[in-house]
Amino acid sequence: MDKKIIDIKKVTRIYKMGNIKVNALRGIDLKIARGEFVAIMGPSGSGKSTLMNILGCLDIPTTGSYFLEGVDISKLKDNQLAEIRNKKVGFVFQTFNLLSRSNIMGNVELPLIYTKDRIANRKKRNLEAIESVGLTDWIKHRPNELSGGQKQRVAIARALVNNPSIILADEPTGNLDSRTGEEIMAIFQALNREGKTILFVTHELDLAKHAQRIIYLKDGAINGEETISNPVDAKEMLKNMPKLEDKFNSMEEVDLK
Ligand code: ADP
Ligand code: MG
């Protein structure tokens, strides 16, 4: 079996708006090995989300080829693409994209609707995914009862529930404070140690350095690449970061004086 989980060649994506063409991707070549943990960086508008959407089978290239676990994605019809997306890809968004009227279990079970698995088995997988992000005590809660970090953990559980080959996260910590962002990185690193292939987009070099490799995008093209020989360990970082609760406590103390 091909050890490259992702292999794209000369991928372009041109958005057409009226008679204007936007060259969002201008010929990207990229290979990702199974089990890699990769960060994508680049200025706003450089094509990061466009690339992630293509890798996640939410969109297809205008030209170029994309092989995901050896399957030629560019040749698939819409329904086949949807099936591949559901089975092979877990997607995490900056804005969480949770269903506000469903509790955690309801949100996490969403990708399971398309599986032929028995109900008891689905429930087991649902609870396992929730447990893996540490939210077992919260399963009946709805998104508006959760913190930003908890919401993102629900989104990660949802991304994991079908046991996909790859997790793609587009600025997953963009709406979170730095400690919570570090906690999300700790979850990704734990998943990666268990063998998951993970790609995430970030604006922050400090976060990108948690990955094994950083890919830099500029103006729709790859502008450089860096191997991180000693990735930052999120669990270690967290030991030296203040907890949010500590901040509240010290504020109360100030008020009392
Ligand atoms: P990034 O995620 O790095 O900020 P994007 O991939 O969102 O960049 O955008 C790359 C370029 O493509 C930008 O110039 C953006 O304005 C344009 N673009 C993105 N999505 C669309 C769209 N749906 N229609 C037209 N242009 C788009
Ligand atoms: Mg983006």
Image (cartoon, rainbow, N blue to C red):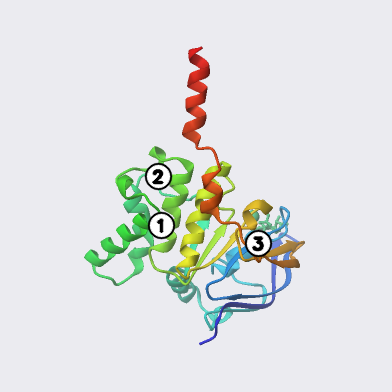
Locate ligand 2 by image quadrant: bottom right
Q: Is residue 52 above or below residue 70?
A: above
Which element is circle 1 on? helix
Which element is circle 3 on? strand
Residue neighbourhood size for the residue with mark 1, other residues' Cα within 10 Å, grouped as few (<14), some (14–19), many (≥20):
many
Residue neighbourhood size for the residue with mark 2, other residues' Cα within 10 Å, grouped as few (<14), some (14–19), many (≥20):
few
Q: Is residue 155 left or right of residue 177?
A: left
Q: Position of residue 46 (x, y in %)?
A: 73, 59
Q: Which residue is mark 2?
A: 100
First in sequence: mark 3 vs mark 1: 3
User: What label sits on residue 157 in the rendered view?
Assistant: 1
Q: Is mark 3 within 8 Å of ligand 1?
A: no
Q: Which residue is mark 3?
A: 40
Question: Marks 3/1: CA distance?
Answer: 22 Å
First in sequence: mark 1 vs mark 2: 2
Residue sitting farthest toward the top: 257
Q: Position of residue 124 (x, y in %)?
A: 27, 62
Q: Amino acid at mark 1?
A: Ala
Tell me where residue 227 sits by quadrant.
bottom right
Question: Marks 1/2: CA distance?
Answer: 16 Å
Residue positioned 62% across, 53% down in the render: 207
| Foreground of the two, 94 or 238 | 238
Residue positioned 43% across, 45% down in the render: 150
Residue neighbourhood size for the residue with mark 3, other residues' Cα within 10 Å, grouped as few (<14), some (14–19), many (≥20):
many
Q: Amino acid at mark 2?
A: Ser
Is residue 94 visible in the rendered structure shown here? no
Is residue 215 visible in the rendered structure shown here? yes
| Foreground of the two, 142 or 253 | 253
Question: Marks 2/3: CA distance?
Answer: 29 Å
Residue positioned 26% across, 61% down in the render: 123
Q: Is mark 2 within 8 Å of ligand 2?
A: no
Q: Is mark 1 within 8 Å of ligand 2?
A: no
